[in-house]
Amino acid sequence: MHSSIIKKLTTLQERREEIEVLLNELSIVSDQVRFCSLSKEHTQLLAITQCFQKWKQLKTDINIITDLLHDLEMRDIAQEEILKLKNNQQELEKELQMLLLSRDPNDERGCFLEIRAGTGGNEAALFAGLLFRMYNRYAEKQGWKIDIINANDGEHGGFKEVIAKISHSGAYGLLKFESGGHRVQRVPNTESQGRVHTSSCTIAVMPEIPEADLPKIHTNDLRIDTFRSSGAGGQHVNTTDSAIRITHLPTGLVVECQDERSQHKNKAKALGVLSARLQANEIQRRQQQESSTRRNLLGSGDRCDRIRTYNFPQGRITDHRIGLTIHRLDEFIEGKLDMLIKPILQEYHTNQLTLLSETK
């Protein structure tokens, strides 16, 4: 195990021991806020430090048994035992590395999924519809429910824009690397010469932010308009001004919601999307500031980043960030996204471990 990782683990163990002393002090016990904070930190450190203690004990045992290799009568037994201990040590090292990885607290949350048609006109809108159907199929396989917040239909089908909410825990952690530009290469139904056209869509996946953590939005910064809902939904929806459009004046962000019959419910949903967008913009700003000192091999998640190409004539899908091409496009479109999601997450974890080892 890399010396820098051992150093980090030693620091964490020392911190755990320090907290254990503090938790027994009367001044800490009487301060409930401080006591709860330290107790939570202690719980977070417990698993990794206990694993580190096991690793250190194995290292000590290996050193002791190694001395027995000089004993001719004990050499064979010692070699067998050392091999067993080293295998156990390697397993513990893998576990420690995973425990050390900085976990995104948003991974356990639900998310908002935004799909917008890009270049390609009507074909791009049809592609946006296909992508939404693909994610909907994936959600069904995961047992998730998708609620459409707002949809702007394309002239010949699909969507110019569709925003949906997935409230299931862990949805963001699995879908967060879907953000970026998605390109399709296929022959449109309107193409008489059989020529392949290229169109694109942009996707943004944003974590659902708990109410307590929402960025403060001042009422004076908002312009709220009501309008009549359009599209499917029945006579009541189409004859009442229940749809909501919220404009955040400082940033120019605009969010619409017409999914609910209640104006108040639409406003609440729209504010939820607006908060998520503002939070995502802040995270992106911080990442750009840190880009000179960190390596982000999976891209920034910006809409302008082309992350994936769907080539229908050749039946292949390519993720450009990890250089992986799979010739199972039909299955992928039907919602079997794990064939790319899992390798992407694995690459992300590998990158984190590399950075961890390089950090001095």
Image (tube, helix red, strand yellow):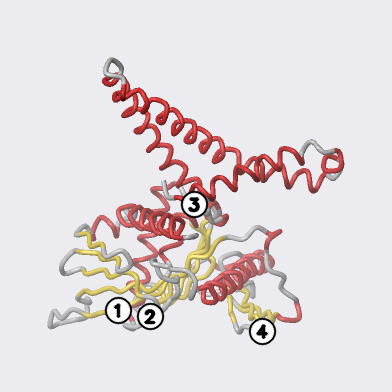
Q: Position of residue 150 (x, y in %)?
A: 52, 70
Give the camera-side residue of 12 and 63.
63
Question: Residue 101, labelled with which disc?
Answer: 3
Q: Which residue is mark 2?
A: 118
Give the alpha-carbon distance from disc 1 to disc 4, as whole Å.
32 Å
331 left or right of 314?
right
Residue 179: percent from left, percent from top: 43, 68
Left or right for 212, reference 302: right
- Disc nearest the viewer among 2 and 3: 3
**Amino acid carrying mark 4 in the image:** Pro
Quarter-of-image position of residue 353: bottom left
Q: Kindly identify which residue carries mark 1.
A: 199
Q: Nearer the viewer, mark 2 or mark 4?
A: 4
Instruction: Report how far apart the C-alphas of labels 2 and 3 lie in the structure.
Output: 35 Å
Q: Quadrant of residue 218?
A: bottom right
SS class, disc 2: loop
Alpha-carbon distance for marks 1 and 3? 37 Å
Assign a secondary structure to mark 4: loop
| Pointer 4 residue | 250
Depth check: 74 or 291 in front?
74
Q: Are marks 2 and 1 in contact (CB under 8 Å)?
A: yes
Determine crowd level at label 4: few under 14, some 14-19, many 20+ residues with C-alpha closer than 10 A: few
Front-most of 33 and 29? Answer: 29
